[in-house]
Every structure is written in C-alpha cells, then in structure tokens.
Image: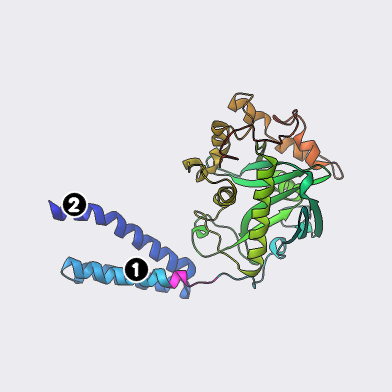
Amino acid sequence: MKKALRWLLLTPLLLASFAWACAALYFDGPLSGWIAAAFALAAVAIAGWVRPFRKSLAAYCICFLAVIFWWLSIEPSNDREWLPDVAQLPAAEIDGDLVAIRNVRNFSYRSETDYDEHWEERSYDLSKLRGVDLFLIYWGSPWIAHTIMSWVFEDGPPLAISIETRKEVGEEYSAVRGFFRQFELYYVVSDERDVIQLRTDHRGEDVYLYRLRAKTETARNVLLAYLEEINRLSHRPRWYNAFRYNCTTTIRHHIQSVTPGSPFNWRILLNGRIDELGYMRGTIDTSLPFDELKMRSYITEKAKALEEGSDFSTAIREGLPGYGRPLPRTDSAGKGGQGS
C-alpha cells in the first residue's frame, strides 16, 4: 500500500519535471535539441537500470537540478538584433509632476509589417492625470487576451503602455516558447493610435475598452511604478514569461506594489475573463448588466472607421459606459483599487 501511494504521489511530479527539463533544453539549449534527447535517454536509463528506487530517484534529481541551475544561469540581454518595432528602449525622466519619456512609439502602419517608424519624446504633467483605462484584446480564444493600460490626461493624448515580448529579427512569438527563456520583457510606450489601430486594422483583433474606477492617486502611482520598471529594464533586462511576467500578471504586480491586498483570481491567468473579474469587484462600470457593458465597450469597428488625422483617442471613447460622468477623484469602487 505504501509503495502504491508513493508512486501515486511521485509519478505526476516526475513526469512534469521530465517534460519541463526536456522542453527547456530543447528551446533554450544549444545543439538543436540533441542535449534534450540526451537528457531524455539518461532519464530513461536511470529509471530502467539503477536500483534500488531511492538511488534511481537521487540520480534523476541530480540530473534535473543540473538542468535547473543551467537554465537559471541564462542571462537576458539588451544587445541583440531587434525587430524595428521594439528596437528602441523607452526611458523616463521624472521631476515632481513632470515626466519626460523618450522613445514613445507612434508608427504609421500600412500593414502589420510595413510601417513608417516614428519614435518621439513626450512630456506629461501628472497633476493633469484624470484616469486610467484598460484595453482588452482578443486574437483567438475567448479565454486569452492581451491587456494594455492607458493613462488619460486633461491636456494631452493618453499614454498607452503594452507589456510584450521583445523579438529579434527573424523571430516570431510562440505561446509555448513564452514559458521559457526565449524573449526579453519589453514595455511598448506608445500613442494609442499606434498600439490599438495596429490590432484593429491590421491584425483583425477584437478590442474592448473599459474605464477603471480607480483613485487618481492610485492611477498616478501605478504609472510611476511602470516608469520605474521601464528605467530598470533599460539597464537590467528581464525575461518575459507567459506565466509569471506576462501582459496581465505584470500589471497585477505593479498594482499590488501600490495597493496590496487584492486576492488572486484564476481570471488573472485566463485573462480573457479579466473584465468579468473587474465587474465582480466593481473596478469597471457596473451601471449596466455585464453582457451589455461588454457589447458597448467593443471599439474595433469604431477604430477601423476613423480616418487619418482624426482624434483617435477621443473618438474611440465616445458613448462608452463610464465616460458620461466626471472622472473620479476618489475611489468609487471602495477598497481593492483596480482589482486585478
């Protein structure tokens, strides 16, 4: 009975560790998978020939720990041949309420891969900050989405920041590779027309826009947390990770650093349902039934219909729930801040 229980408990752990180690060696290791194959053969040999079981387990654990130590030693870098749309690292200079940001992306797109590059320096007065919004973007499954935060100012265009992978020339995003050390973390600091119309017009994605019911002070502090991380990444790059450091879990990290205490929820990982979580917690507009709110928050067709030169950010917000009332100076949602 004890032996059967031991196998029942150990087998899932051993299989999971074996699969992870093989994948890590395959994706991140040298020699095009030969080392992954060698590890797999070694693990099978240990399981088949080393006796008793405790010696077999110890030998396998040594091999597995060696893979972990090697994998953790792989360093990210800012010095690679980057794709043009992520080639420039943003950086911010903060002086009280005044923020100057270098390398704000404001590209003009003819297609997803054909564009004119425009990197700008923009200045923002944090005393004129009036709110923060959340874009939720679907490209396939309704369970998975991309999230973008955008800060709204009284006297200028919003500042959109999208947390993404920094891809090299010839590299494409892979959801599976995103769990390994394949992509550096990158903050796209951009004009909304760039980062949103790229998705609505050229990628054919579905975009929703929600006003977050957060204190202006909270919105300011979360933005400052973003900018501090952006400056750190310019000196100390970090790996993107589809589980720990993705577009939504990193947002949660920044919010938790400002307003800790919001409990974790499974919708943070299956983030296509993050708006549902916001509705449950009162951090987005709740004056309508959720299904109607989501329908009215859909902006893809509105964005696609806009002509060049139009006020993109104002136009996509016209008629959206939560925009007919003055922007909140206090947290109308109660404790929990932005709730993600």
User: Does the image show residue 242?
Assistant: yes
Marks 1 and 2: CB-CB under 8 Å? no
User: What is the secondary structure assignment of the residue under circle 2?
Assistant: helix
Is residue 108 magenta-colored?
Answer: no
**Which of the two labelled residues, at mark 1 and mark 2, occupies the earlier sequence position?**
2
Residue drawn at point x = 30 percent, y = 68 percent:
61
Name the quadrant containing residue 92.
Answer: bottom right
Give the CA distance from mark 1 to mark 2: 23 Å
Q: Crowding at label 1, few (<14), some or many (≥20) Cα neighbours within 10 Å?
A: many
Q: Mark 2 belongs to which amino acid?
A: Leu
Along the horizontal axis of the image, is 313 left or right of 278? right
Q: Which residues are magenta?
A: 70-75
Residue drawn at point x = 84 percent, y = 41 percent:
311
Q: Quadrant of the C terminus?
A: top right
User: What is the secondary structure assignment of the residue under circle 1?
Assistant: helix
Is residue 73 magenta-colored?
Answer: yes
| Residue 107 image point, x, y percent | 78, 55
Residue drawn at point x = 47 percent, y = 73 percent:
73
Residue drawn at point x = 64 percent, y = 54 percent:
225
Q: Crowding at label 2, few (<14), some or many (≥20) Cα neighbours within 10 Å?
A: few
Along the horizontal axis of the image, is 33 left or right of 156? left
Q: Nearer the viewer, residue 27 or 335?
A: 335
Label disc, if present, on residue 64 of the rendered structure: 1
The residue identified by callout 2 is: 5
Q: Mark 1 belongs to which amino acid?
A: Phe
Task: Tell which residue pokes out farthest to the right in this image.
Answer: 309
| Residue 244 image point, x, y percent | 50, 55
Q: Nearer the viewer, residue 55 or 117?
A: 55
Looking at the picture, does residue 274 appear above or below residue 88? Answer: above
| Residue 168 image point, x, y percent | 63, 66
The colour scheme used here is: rainbow
Name the quadrant containing residue 296.
Answer: top right
